[in-house]
Image: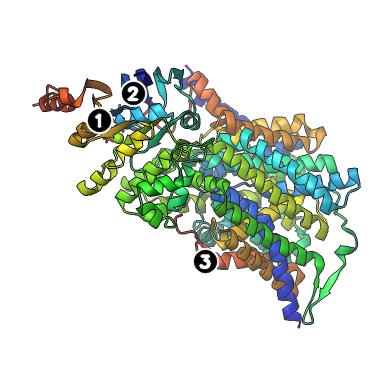
Amino acid sequence: MSRSLSPLIALFALAVLYALPAIAPRAMVQDLFGILTLLVLAMNWNLLAGFAGLVSVGQQAFVGIGAYAMFAAIILMGLDPLVGVVIGGIAAAVFAVPMAFFAFRLNGAYFAIGTWVVADIARLAISQWKALGGGTGTSLPKGTAKEMAFVDGIKEMLDVSTAAAADALTYWLMLSLAVAMLVASYIFLRSRMGLGLQAIRDNENAARSVGVDPLKLKAAVFLLTAFATGLCGALAFIQITRVTPDAAFSVIDWTAFVIFITVIGGIGTLPGPIVGVVVFYALQRALADYGTIYLIVLGCLGIAVMLFARRGLWGLFTDRTGIDPLPLRHRPPRVAKPSHSA
Amino acid sequence: MSALLTIAGLTAHYGDFQALFGVDLTLDQGQTVAIIGANGAGKTTLMRAITGVAKVTAGSVRLAGEEITRSPAPDILTRGVAMVPEGRKLFPSLTVEENLLIGAHARRGNGFWTLERIQTLFPILKERRLSPGTALSGGQQQMVAIGRALMSNPQVLLCDELSLGLAPVVIKEIYAAFPQIKDSGTSIIVVEQDISQALRVADHVHCMMEGRITLSGRPSELSRDAIHDAYFGVNHA
Amino acid sequence: MMLIDTLAQGMLLGGLYALFAAGLSLVFGIMRLVNLAHGDLIILAAYLILTVATVTGLHPFVAVLIAAPLMFGFGWLLQTHLLNRVLGNDILPPLLVTFGLSVVIQNGLLSTFTADSQKLTAGSIEAASVDLGVVTLGVMPVLTFGSAVLVIFLLNQLFYRTALGRAFRATSDDAVTAQLMGIRPQRVFAMATGIAMVVATIAALYLGTRANFDPSIGPARLLYAFEAVIIGGLGSLWGTLAGGIVIGLAQAIGASINPEWQILSGHIAFVLVLLIRPRGLFPRAND
Ligand SMILES: Nc1ncnc2c1ncn2[C@@H]1O[C@H](COP(=O)(O)OP(=O)(O)OP(=O)(O)O)[C@@H](O)[C@H]1O
Ligand SMILES: [Mg+2]
């Protein structure tokens, strides 16, 4: 029953999400935009840490570079913001090449701090870029959103203000990015390469012996997630409209939250980030009046998950119920027995 | 003679794989017992189960009447069961002398075995005392491993495949230390693939196959054929 | 003249970074644990010294004698109740748990002490300096550097000359065989983290007397500490001191050209060293 029903429910939910700017107040669209941003970042980090075993604490580098490249495209080159977003993604991917070259020399846990150092280098270097405001940052020129491609059309179609139309456009783009990420991850993880990646995570030597080159595969995942993270960062800062090195390269906003979301939802599971982002949003709402308490709660939750349920809430759910709508492979038997593949 | 170590119905698993099937064995005070068996028979698992590093799923191990089953490995050592592990397992960051001293890490009070006595037993260990433990030859490393275990002044010494990979002369040299170890009041269990060595050194021999003891007796009572059958299975061609 | 002065300041600054790093190096050497909360634990220790000094009216250099055993106890409990449970082949749990801890400590400090900057006041010694002819050095930086050398010397003695150090090394080599020697790895680890926290408290003393601190500056200290450890070579305590000096020198030289380049220069020196010597300056043979 659940098998035949769940795709329908998913399609319906998706249709509602796409229709939202037409039916919901602007504040809600903005809220959802924020959630989707975190979701996209979490899906990327999950691919890195949960599947490729690359625990990066430097994802803020790609967000920041994406954002700054987009600002540069608009302010210095006078390009359309949407072109700027694509440039943001490309810039992040380009930056990922030397970053990988460096950070991949560091093993396991040291990779984590290595990526953090590189992100800090990027932040400090961009603080020296005077044309974009140096350490104090800069804002998008007035009217940028208005002149963005498609905004006029959307404005007429939805019969809303220009600002709301711009919000709707960025929202749709972020939603599409999230959907694309989800679909691409699913296809990739079930492909030969994706299965190879999971084999590497579980046992690097075994994977090498079946002919997957762990390094190449990991590097590819690193570059692709950098691209998507850069796109996401650029898109996010169109809405924020103001960029500073500290905000664009914030380890808390762009990496810590994302790590907790993924861990709580279920690291190494496809739906984990989705579950995590919902829990995160609920927590944020419930504890909004208590300031830093909510970060403490988040940290404690993350620790508790690692202690008691390493595959997060989603892992708990599939273990308890045996339902897994997005299985990545035929689950191996819990304990290795003489193998007989069915 | 009273039983020092009593093992009853000992069962051990690695995950779903059962490696020991209800092993019974006793070691009397002052006795040397040998366990022989082919590769994969479960000898090492038995040693690891006694010393608390392998998971026991059923049965019991008693030392001088006291239950030590499932005690943490460090507790079992403090109670008086020391092991010379298969493959020696010296600590590479420690010198020869430090490898010996670490054997006395948990020791309380005095006993027969001291650093000097070990160095008298195996003089080469004094000569090479400052070398890294793993820089020694296989035989010398085996001496360090024996000395390290003796440093805790154990009541029971478990030796897992002392002769593995060593030349016959070296094996002889190592086993030449056994009378002194016995004289110090230590009872011994040796695991050996070298059957004639086992028969020579032991008061009692057990043969293991596929996780069970298939034959037991004094060396003089056991015929070569019986051992062969117990070793490889009666049904083998 | 200017150059010599810069180099001397940089080297002394390196002493502070070596103090940040020594605990990290020790813990990594023994249990292969990378503690992402290390910087925040140093800041926690600074607030502890501050609290003790404020409550009792003691001088920070005396207050540290009360704070250090408390931090040892905290480290011990942290290891036995939290970190020991996540050590293992999978690197993810310890990383994420210490990352969570980092966020919890930072925000815990923030809600207890607010975001205002604090400082440990040590009195006239802060302004004192010694004139060596070629350069004039502050007494505090010299004291910091001297403490770093002493701490690393003592840690080395502990590591290579005591029964505890032997147990540290044996457990690090092979925890299962260590248990057959009567060693309890969990206790050894707790001891190591306790000692690392004592070193962190000493680092906090100098951090807090030399400059302002607030709850948010922990991660940056973690990065400097980490860079010092890696530059020095994993598992080498004297290497860690050398690594600290490299970062200190690079930062001082960078800052003398443009104050905004201080941190960036340190990071870049780290990247360059690693590109030239991937295993650091003094790598341990068996790693
Ligand atoms: N860590 C382990 N995980 C799973 N199975 C194991 C493990 N160690 C041993 N086994 C299995 O348990 C059985 C008994 O192994 P054990 O090492 O006790 O044999 P042994 O008699 O000591 O052999 P050898 O003479 O080769 O040392 C073997 O089938 C082996 O494959
Ligand atoms: Mg064996």
Name the residue: 72% across, 65% down.
Answer: C13
Q: Quadrant of ligand 2?
A: top left
Q: Nearer the viewer, residue C56 or C111?
A: C56
Name the residue: 51% across, 19% down.
Answer: A321
Q: Report the disc number at residue C239.
A: none
Quadrant of res C127: bottom right
Label 2 element class: strand
- Dot 2 surroundings within 10 Å: few (below 14), some, or many (20 or more)? many
The percent position of residue C55, horizontal first and vertical second, equals 90, 43
Which residue corresponds to mark 3? C275
Quadrant of res B188: top left
- Examine the rendered structure and indicate whether residue C134 appears above or below residue C74: below
The percent position of residue A30, horizontal first and vertical second, equals 72, 39
Q: Report the disc number at residue B27.
A: 2
Locate residue B190 relative to residue A197 in the image: left or right: left
Which residue corresponds to mark 1? B202
